Amino acid sequence: MTETAPASSLEYFRYRLNRDLGGVAGWFAQKWRASWLFKIAAVLIGLGIVFWIAVFVWLASDLPEAESLLEYETPLPTVVRGADGEIVHSYARERRVQLQYPDFPERLVGAYLSAEDKTFFSHGGVDVTGTANAVFDYATKFGSGDRAVGGSTITQQLAKILLLGDEYSVTRKLKEMILASRIEGVLSKQEILELYLNEIPLGRRSFGVQAAARAYFDKDVGDLELHEMAFLAILPKAPERYGRRGQEEAALVRRDFVLSQMEENGYISASERQQAASQPLGLATQRTQRSVDAGYFLEEVRRQLIDQFGENAETGDNSVYAGGLWVRTSLDPEIQEAARDALRTGLVRYHGRRGWGGPVANIDLSEGNWAGQLASSYISIGYKDWRVGVVTQRSGSSATIGFADGEEAPLSSLPNALKAGDVIVVRPQGSGFRVASLPTAQGGLVVQSPQTGRVVAMQGGFDHRLSDFNRATQAMRQPGSTIKPFVYATGLDNGMTPSTEIDNTRFCYYQGNRLGEKCIRGGRAGQFPMRYGLEQSQNIMTVQIGMQAGMENVVDTIEAVGIGEADPYAATALGSEETTVLRMVNAYSALANHGRLNQPTVIDYVQDRRGKVIWRADDRNCNGCNMAEWDGNSMPRFGMKGEQVMDARTAFQTMHMLEGVVDRGTATVLNTLGLPLFGKTGTTTGPKDVWFVGGTQQLIAGAYVGFDRPKNMGGYAQGGTIAAPIIKDLIQNSRERWVDLPAIAPAGVRMVRVDRRTGKRVFDRWPTGNAKSDVIWEAFKPDSEPERSTRQDEIAAKRDEILALIRASRNAGPSVESSDGQPEDFVEDQGGIY
């Protein structure tokens, strides 16, 4: 009887399935009844299947999702650019550069496929042949302690790198195979290769082929030659071996094998293989890249970025060491280099012939491996041809210096206190080295743009490799007389003018019932215009102005310009409170910027790895800037930047008087530069610190010099002789950045001819341009100009001056008096500054 096929294909499929399954079931039942061996075999096979299903479920239960790779972000370093847009640094614990698949040269891809997975484009994540070879190799080496070959495909390696880790076990291998199959179902072959070539560890702290190309050959992947591509392809097998000294022969053998595989797989011809095989390894020992010695500046940038975005991937998607940020800073490399050299020159100049100041650090030689200890200390120096080393032995007048690379050399010019284990700085001499004397004093220097607040250079010490303490931002020091312009500005805001006469004979201050009244004499007795007091840094006149204007008002001014909190005492007017170089420079920037204060910034803006701006220092809105079409109104513009913290006219008057400090006051060392400079020197009690802060309306610079543990610098130490020359060197070494333009006055300022000695108005003479000229231009607010000076006024002023000198000579005695008859030092008692 013939069977009739069902009408529909679905019904026919069901019919065949039922018939075939019925046949199999019948056959199995017959065998089960007929043979006990069949029963045993069937049970074992069944248990085996159940076991492997259970193992698969167990292994797969806690595996990461392959879909997570769709959103995977390669941990990338933060790249830092200077103000000119050029890369100056990167914050990286690993070398990483992310490329897209089309960026990889075809031959480079072929080299990796030939070396690691030639069946990559045909398997589904696991290569059966390779796995079988790995199982056999594992079985033969089991118990020997030797590691078997991996047999992993590129997909399996990717699963291990990104999802599993580098554990050596059968369990990890099985998980790797499961994940590889899942990855193949989620990503395309090109996406897998892109991730692999960006993530594979290749030695020298480099991850991915672009970073490795830079690390080993100082090239981009697009510039690699064939033999260099083949070398990079051997690195996944032993990333920390083939690039090391002494492994050249092994690396050449493995590289030539990869070249032969590339020929066999059709990526290159025989002649190309032969030509590439004849090439040496050609590994680069040093990378050539733009280097800006701005360690203090860059560390300040790093600190701010970590505060804003976090340090590691766990702290956020845009972290410093994993987020791949692109940071545009305000750093001007030319000015930064000039600032570094100027401060170093000034510190060396002050140190003079003072001799050796002691070791930088110490190493315990008894622990052995002194070279490793020295290398791990990360202490170095970037000054001239000087080097940092450790004294490995000393015997009498002979000693040996050792360096981080293990090199040793004889050492001469030995200080008596030098001993084995001292980490010191040396400089070459003949066939060996001699001990170099580092400056024992330190300092800080900042250069800023007043109109924007952008810090363009920062040097926080002699060398950041020796000390990472940033004295430009972290060192709290007394500013000395550099605080005085803000006392004078307060006087100008409270009814005084640059021509207001102030008594410089003496100042008496009632200290209470116990202390009574204390007095201190001035340097030159008599009444003098306010300008004279500022140009010649007269303490008595400064305190008189502060008291007349109100010390509470002086403190308000100091705090308004961001110098810091202060107490309303007379000593505050002389710079007894503490502040930093950065704050002082920023305060002087407000003077140059017509009283508008900008917050100092080292970062202009930050972009994420895709180029989107995620933070900007200048957060002003520009309403209408993004209009699709012009609406016919005036061009949209940004609003004014910064906060108005001082009357613009007062700020200009103060700045104009400070020009006299450079022309004929305490900073005349700067008047040969041919720039309209203004500024103020400062020397603290002791003296313990010396300062200069000033510049032009386009750039403000400030520097101080002093010991980290404050002590007397010597009676000759002054701001005008130590700090001001540093600023002079800075300007000379970056002269193109300093614009020779006269200062621009704000609205409401009247320029009037006055006699600088009396402050009286002059009509019959004109300023000559000579700094010593009696007649100068002075800045006044409307209706505050002085009266006309006459010959009789001049005679009377001279007479008063002579009489004051006569009285002073008759009353000669202790420079300071008190009501209880005991001599007192007002300056010392008040923390005063001269």
Image (cartoon, helix red, strand yellow):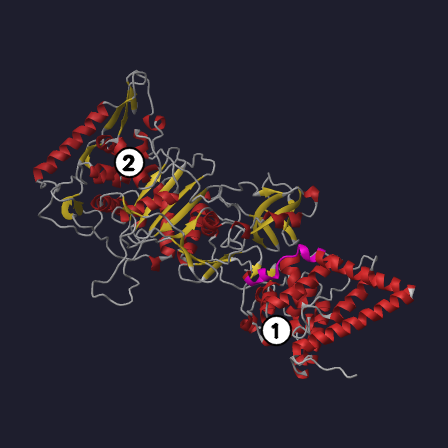
Type of the residue with mark 1: Leu
The answer to whether 298 appears left or right of 387 in the picture is left
Q: Alpha-carbon neighbours of circle 2 within 10 Å: few (<14), some, or many (≥20)?
A: some
Point out the image quarter for the N terminus.
Answer: bottom right
Disc 2 versus disc 1: distance between alpha carbons?
67 Å
Write the residue at 53% across / 41% down: 357
Residue nearest the viewer, comparing 737 with 611: 611
The majority secondary structure of the magenta stretch comes to helix
- Residue 556, numbered label: 2
What is the magenta range? Answer: 58-70
Q: Is residue 579 above or below residue 831?
A: below
**Mark 1 or mark 2, which is nearer the start of the sequence?**
1
Residue nearest the viewer, comparing 369 with 666: 369
- In percent of width and height, residue 101 lies at 55, 71
Write the residue at 26% across / 59% down: 637
Query: Where, by quadrant of the figure, is residue 269 drawn?
Result: bottom right
Query: Where, by quadrant of the figure, is residue 221 drawn?
Result: bottom right
Mark 1, residue position? 108
Write the residue at 84% across / 57% down: 143
